[in-house]
Amino acid sequence: MQAEIITIGDEILIGQIVDTNSAFLGKEFNKFGISIYQITSVQDEKSHILKALKEAEENADIIIITGGLGPTKDDITKHTICEYFEDTLVEDKAVLTNVEQIFAKYNSAPLLEVNKQQALVPSKCKVLMNHNGTAPGMWLEKNGKVFVSLPGVPYEMKALITEQVIPKLRAQFKFPYIMHKTILTYGLGESALAERIETWENNLPNFIKLAYLPSLGRVRLRLSGKATDKSVVEKEILHQVDLLLTQIEDVFVGYEEDESIEAVIGKRLTEQGKTLAVAESCTGGRIAEAFTANAGSSAYFKGSVVTYATASKVKILNVSEEAIKKHSVVSKQVAEAMAKNVRTLFESDYAISTTGNAGPTKGDSEAEVGTVWIAIASKDQVYSEVFNFGDHREKVIGRATNKAFEMLQKYFLKK
Amino acid sequence: MQAEIITIGDEILIGQIVDTNSAFLGKEFNKFGISIYQITSVQDEKSHILKALKEAEENADIIIITGGLGPTKDDITKHTICEYFEDTLVEDKAVLTNVEQIFAKYNSAPLLEVNKQQALVPSKCKVLMNHNGTAPGMWLEKNGKVFVSLPGVPYEMKALITEQVIPKLRAQFKFPYIMHKTILTYGLGESALAERIETWENNLPNFIKLAYLPSLGRVRLRLSGKATDKSVVEKEILHQVDLLLTQIEDVFVGYEEDESIEAVIGKRLTEQGKTLAVAESCTGGRIAEAFTANAGSSAYFKGSVVTYATASKVKILNVSEEAIKKHSVVSKQVAEAMAKNVRTLFESDYAISTTGNAGPTKGDSEAEVGTVWIAIASKDQVYSEVFNFGDHREKVIGRATNKAFEMLQKYFLKK
């Protein structure tokens, strides 16, 4: 059984917004055994939407359509779907009530005629009530295939998928079992890793696929198995992982479940009752932001300082001026002092620090663009390493952030 | 003239990575007059890639293919394109040299046979040398249409597009002129805005399109004009913007050029020789990260503190314990004290602070989930406002961040 995603909206095609909805949908659908065959992004244009619907119907059993449901003239998804189903729009009383309630809660402005039109839906559709916005989700069926139209606003779409679409799909269809297991490695390039595990890879059974996902200094190995029998998939994947691990012990960091490494670290800190503080220079807040984006971070995340200017490293983090003068601001000594002192400042168990030059030009130090010192401190220990992450700002910040997570895990949190 | 993007890779379809490449391509191509007709994401599977290539060739004149060029077995793009062009792979000496150099620079491991195979390219292709990685870009032509295959790693792809693909396209084709003008508004919902400007919208000439882009508390209005004659488009767009502004003066924030609001703020601060510091609680580093993601931020960004724990607000930011006890940690008094004190701490001209509850549960204060106080301070002035951003963590952090940018612009940087 396969699904397709159609995202509708000029703003995606002109690059004004990044399509994060599709990644969410891909992840959620895979969890319960539906592969996404294709993602298609099309313009707010009737004939193009009709063509995409027709093609998706040929390829897939479930078609998820997001976007183009706003109250304004440029949004034409609802009318176009109505035409595709040779249907007419009718007012849904419950949706109208929902629109009125949402409006009363969040708007000072009066309810307008265009807002009321959000309550018009194709007569053949089942309404999926949107409690976070005025555009309802719509469930339609045709020749045994399911079409679901959802608003493009990410949190509205996500709530509808999780609370209504997936339960409804599970009730209606029988899905094969899909299992993914992602193994995080660092320190070995994609090709060297591939060469090392070649024999193992060649002997994988054909219902298990392997993918290499290199990203800013680490390589994730993703094993995906799919079959009707859950126990067969689970048993074989775990068996293959065991075989694999014996060959990559030296570069194995851990498993990445559904979560990012920072979420995994956060969980482990919470379990252990430990806390963390961060002092960032070149990463500019990215590390703190990654932790605090996760709910529950206040249990372990004490806080952070971004000491972007050299003077603030001295004033706030109490890094000695002599050390900066003698070793430069991008140095082992400064990184270690930052980690030790931010730990004391926030009274945390562990601390991370970064100091480096993300480019594109040299900053307060003479360090080459891309040079980053990272330090990790506990009460009694400090570890630091230096890296060169190349000369792209985005890449330097991203790789330094990932490396800091890995170092924390490697030195203090490894199971 | 239209283009299509094909992104190849299972990792996109299972949601393991978000496709940011397409947004970049959409933006860059629109700048010089090429619309993206469709974005199609397909699996690492030969027949599916061949089908996508054929369909794209029917719709578009320029087909950009990203991803699937790694050295490992799961990457099959190069072989599939070679088959589509009925071509054979040949070794390119210059690419081999590039692979060897990149390897020597970034890897301690020896060069493997699979890495050398990165130098194999279809005999009919023009190589676009990739100075940031081992997979070369490939330019192929068929029946007057251009196919460009690029690596999926964002910074490698971006450099190839900017430095090689776009200059080559401009030399080979004549493009219509496209102009976008995006107007940032806040404080009025999408539908109320649409009703207010309805007459103006209905009278737009047909070569100008209007789109409403609502996002976390603000609505952007995007005017897009396209014609062969540059002066006609420019004149008409500017004329229409003048007409529009008379009707939305009270909610107009500014123009959004190609840049994010934080980049615009950064530019203005740099021009004025002013500096900024940030004290974040519920936004957890997001504000600092947004500024420092831009090159040149060290000119105006002094630093930030994330005082996530209440104790650190007292210890590091010198917020009085009485004020916290009396008014709670999510209050006007605490927000204003944070802004004033972080300004003093970092010796900056301006400061931003946030304190609130991003949810999903109540934290150190009794404030409702979604409540956020934001304060903006200069040497002599402090402004603060309170908001309720609803009950989704992601949305609360995002809206609070946007609102902080807007308040800084509104109170201190408005032209």
Image (cartoon, coloured by chain):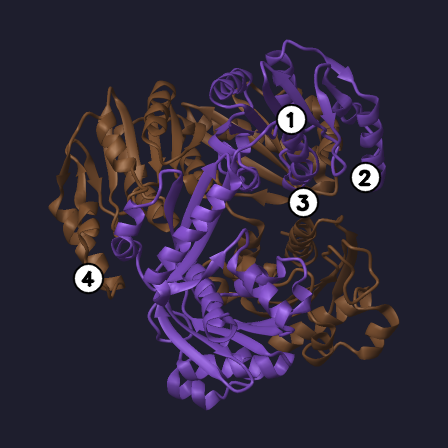
Chain colours: A purple, B brown
For the question of whether residue B133 can be seen, the reply is: no
Q: Which is nearer the N-term, disc 4 or disc 3?
A: 4
Mark 4, residue position:
B110
Separation of disc 4 and disc 3 at Cα?
49 Å
Foreground mark, 4 or 2? 4
For residue B410, above or below residue B148 = below
Front-lying residue, B327 or B198: B327
Separation of disc 3 and disc 2 at Cα?
14 Å
Determine whether, in the image, residue B182 is placed left or right of residue B151: right
Separation of disc 4 and disc 2 at Cα?
63 Å
For the question of whether residue B277 can be seen, the reply is: yes
- Which of the chains bears the disc numbered 3? B
SS at mark 3 in the image: loop
Mark 1, residue position:
A172
Separation of disc 2 and disc 1 at Cα?
38 Å
Q: Residues within 10 Å of mark 2 (few under 14, many from 20)?
A: some
**Residue B346 percent coordinates (x, y):** 60, 75
Separation of disc 3 and disc 1 at Cα?
35 Å
Foreground mark, 4 or 1? 1
- Which of the chains bears the disc numbered 2? A
**Residue B219 percent coordinates (x, y):** 66, 39
The amino acid sitting under disc 1 is Gln
Whether pointer 4 and pointer 3 mark residues with C-beta atoms closer than 8 Å, the reply is: no
Mark 4 vs mark 1: tell me if same chain.
no
Separation of disc 4 and disc 1 at Cα?
54 Å
Determine whether, in the image, residue A39 is placed left or right of residue B130: right
Q: Which mark is residue B216?
A: 3
For residue A138, above or below residue A108 = above
**Residue B88 percent coordinates (x, y):** 15, 32
Mark 2, residue position:
A107
For residue B309, above or below residue A37 = below
The amino acid sitting under disc 3 is Leu
